[in-house]
Image (tube, helix red, strand yellow):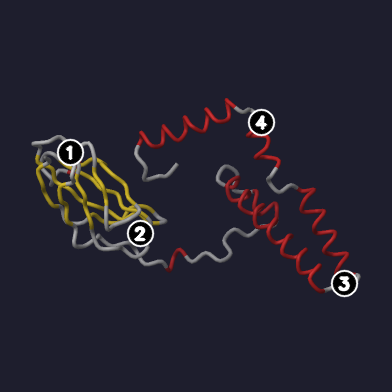
Amino acid sequence: MAPNASDTENISTTELLIAAMTNDPGLYPRMLSNLPSKETIEDIHGRYRESRNASVGGEQQKGLLIELNREVSRFTVLVKIAAENDPTLPQKLGINLQKGKKSSSKVPLTAPGNFIVRHGLEHGTMFAKASHVKGGRSYHIEACEGDPSIESNWRHVATSVLCSKMEIKGLTPGTLYWFRVKAVGAKGFGPASSYVSLMAI
């Protein structure tokens, strides 16, 4: 599920997830069995310490270190997820989740430029494109059938990871639409582009 996906896409994704786990009840326990546990980390840590104390060195010690770092990294991801509901967990586990954060230095998203919309080959379909926005992970297209200066008239009609070919479907032929696009980054939506109008055919 993605924060910028449509309600229909999110509902469909959730239904597929529930159906998969209902059809195969063993999937969820199987997933949990592959997560890093205390016993797994303890075992690798012990073998790594033994190899260091014995001054084994070489590829064996290097391999154990890589394995240990991988399991601790995976465990840290779980702590990040759990910390959303219990912020005290990272500190209790001695894990600093703030380390390496550079979000404050990120450049804010800008409005996509050179936004244009053209008709597609099928009725009720259009294609849009705009300039790439630095930091944009996807593009959120909105349409308006009324006064474009009224914010409540705008609605989401498409999401695309490419700014060069954004497809818009389900438009009503003969209806004049206004369109605009916003880049979506790590912190949410950027400002909207200038809007353009085109009648669906």
Instruction: Depth check: give the residue in front, 37 or 108.
Output: 37
Q: Count the marks: how many?
A: 4
Q: Quadrant of the C terminus?
A: top left
The answer to whether marks 3 and 2 mark residues whose Cβ atoms lie closer than 8 Å is no
Task: Residue lying at the far top in this picture: please name it.
Answer: 22
Give the amino acid type for the residue marked by disc 1 in the picture. Answer: Gly
Mark closer to the chain start, 3 or 4: 4
Q: Which mark is residue 136?
A: 2
| Nearer to us: label 3 or label 2 | 3
| Nearer to us: label 2 or label 1 | 1
- Cα separation, mark 1 vs mark 3, equals 69 Å
Give the secondary structure at mark 2.
Answer: loop
| Nearer to us: label 1 or label 3 | 1
Give the secondary structure at mark 3.
Answer: loop
- Cα separation, mark 3 vs mark 2, equals 48 Å
Instruction: Depth check: give the residue in front, 68 or 62.
Output: 62
Mark closer to the chain start, 2 or 4: 4
| Nearer to us: label 2 or label 4 | 4
Give the amino acid type for the residue marked by disc 3 in the picture. Answer: Val
Give the amino acid type for the residue marked by disc 4 in the picture. Answer: Gly
Mark closer to the chain start, 1 or 3: 3
Q: Residue at x 66, y 54 (%)?
A: 91
Q: Residues within 10 Å of mark 1 (few under 14, many from 20)?
A: some
Q: Residues within 10 Å of mark 3 (few under 14, many from 20)?
A: few
Which residue was labeled with disc 4?
Answer: 26
Q: Residue at x 17, y 48 (%)?
A: 179
Is residue 118 toward the left or the right of residue 4 in the image? left
Q: Residues within 10 Å of mark 4 (few under 14, many from 20)?
A: few
- Cα separation, mark 4 vs mark 1, equals 44 Å
Which residue was labeled with disc 3?
Answer: 56
Mark closer to the chain start, 2 or 1: 1
Q: Which mark is residue 124?
A: 1
